[in-house]
Image (tube, rainbow, N blue to C red):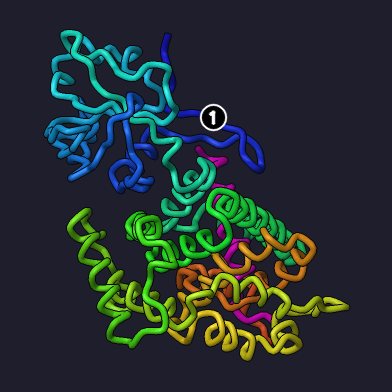
Amino acid sequence: MKFPAVAEIQGLYGPFTFPETLLQKIWDRRDFDTLHAATVGGQRVRIGHPGQWNHGGGPDFKNARLHIGNASITGDVEVHLREADWHAHHHASDPAHANVVLHVVLFPPQCATTRGVNGREIPVLALLPLLHHDLEQYAADDAVERLAAHPLSTAGKSLSSLTPPELSSAIAHHAQKRWHQKIHFASGRVTRLGWDDACHHTALEILGYRNNRPAMVAIAGEHPLESWPQSVSAQNAISFAERIFNEQTDNRAWAPRSSRPANHPRTRLRQYALWASARPAWPQLLQKFAAGFQKNEPAPASVAEWRRVNKAASLRKRIRMEICGDALGGSRFDTLVCDGFLPLLAAQNHAREETLREAWTNWFAGDMPARFAAYLRALGITGASGTPNHNGAGQGLLGFLLETENAAV
């Protein structure tokens, strides 16, 4: 029986695909709970190095350094969606797989080991119980990452053929879908972790950007919010951040593309340490702050009017000061509000979801790619006096691009 290298799973808006290559990426980045990783047979697994990703024939990862149970092991790692894929691909009779020491699978199998070459038993590690997010969020984040260098040409042909009302409706429709998806993901995180830890994990994940997200989430799991120094001097807070940064440097490599110095994970950890010291109960402060977003009746006619009526600049400053202790600013702060704070609040405050959606739509654009912003202006979606660049426009365009890409697959 042949097993596909892609799983089709029912998601929030219908079926979505989860390819084996995405599971390989998760293993390579250690984008799962490595602290509690254990084989199906119950042996603790510690990952010194996940191995070199092999995109050719043979095992998926070569020369991994692992500690399984009481043994330190160097060898290869094979990654499959299901344990049965090993047998379907006839790896047990392939000498190229003779040095596989760990079989990593997505779905937990019935058996604790895989039979390798010459009948050797290979321990199995199932990642599904260890994932930080549900499968749909991993798939969505991976699609966003693939769009990082999207030429916009396919979407351009589709969008430019729409009339202005159709274009406005399409962007609003896809923004709405993105909003509900973010609430769905935030709700799942709150259910798994509780409110305080969900906020803590979300903040560190967003401060890690795309490249260093797994390391930052690992830090959140290893160092709960209550373990961060409270009400200490700036120097003591920064010293704590330095220790954590160096711990992760020992345990895993930070992404080499850490971008500008202001976005370097060491810098972001220092900012979060100052934030946690100044506002140790910040998740509770955030929860109370939901009342700061008021329902507008009637709804403002434009982005500019919403910002004027709600005194958005003042509201932005209050969040920065009262919730974040003035430790974070700039476009990453706005991304934190849109991708973190507002979806988390909506997941906990269903009665205020529409009010929070208005804020999310009209909020400042954050780290929207510059070419997205330019494209939105060229389409006439933003750029007029009443429609400055805003989060809803960027999210709507991103949603449209994702749907266009998925339809082309």
**How many numbered marks are there?**
1
Q: Which residue occupies the foreground of this view, 50 or 277?
A: 277
Q: Is 379 on the left-hand or right-hand side of 221?
A: right
The residue indicated by pointer 1 is 8
Q: On the image, which quarter does residue 79 sit in?
A: top left
Quarter of the figure with the N terminus: top left
Residue 363 at x, y = what percent? 62, 76
Q: Nearer the viewer, residue 21 or 198?
A: 198
Q: In this view of the protein, can residue 157 be seen by the observer?
A: no
Query: Is residue 404 left or right of 58 when viewed as pictured?
Result: right
Q: Is residue 23 above or below residue 399?
A: above
Q: Give the magenta-colored segment's residue range.
A: 386-409
Residue closer to the observer: 161 or 249: 249
Label 1 neighbour load within 10 Å: few <14, some 14-19, many 20+: few
Main SS of the magenta part reads helix
Between 349 and 6, the one lying in front of the other is: 349
Q: Amino acid at mark 1?
A: Glu
Taking the image as shown, residue 134 lies to the left or right of residue 67, namely right
Q: Is residue 205 above or below residue 78?
A: below
Q: Is residue 60 above or below residue 109?
A: below
Q: Position of residue 270 (x, y in %)?
A: 32, 77
Q: At which x and y percent is residue 158?
A: 61, 53
Q: Position of residue 185 (x, y in %)?
A: 58, 52
Q: Quadrant of residue 292?
A: bottom right
Which residue sits at x=33%, y=30%? 125
Residue beneath the point at 66% across and 42% down: 13
Q: Is residue 343 magenta?
A: no
Q: Residue at x 35, y 13 (%)?
A: 88
Q: Secondary structure at mark 1?
A: strand
Identified at 38% across, 71% down, the residue is: 228
Q: In this orientation, does residue 122 appear? A: yes
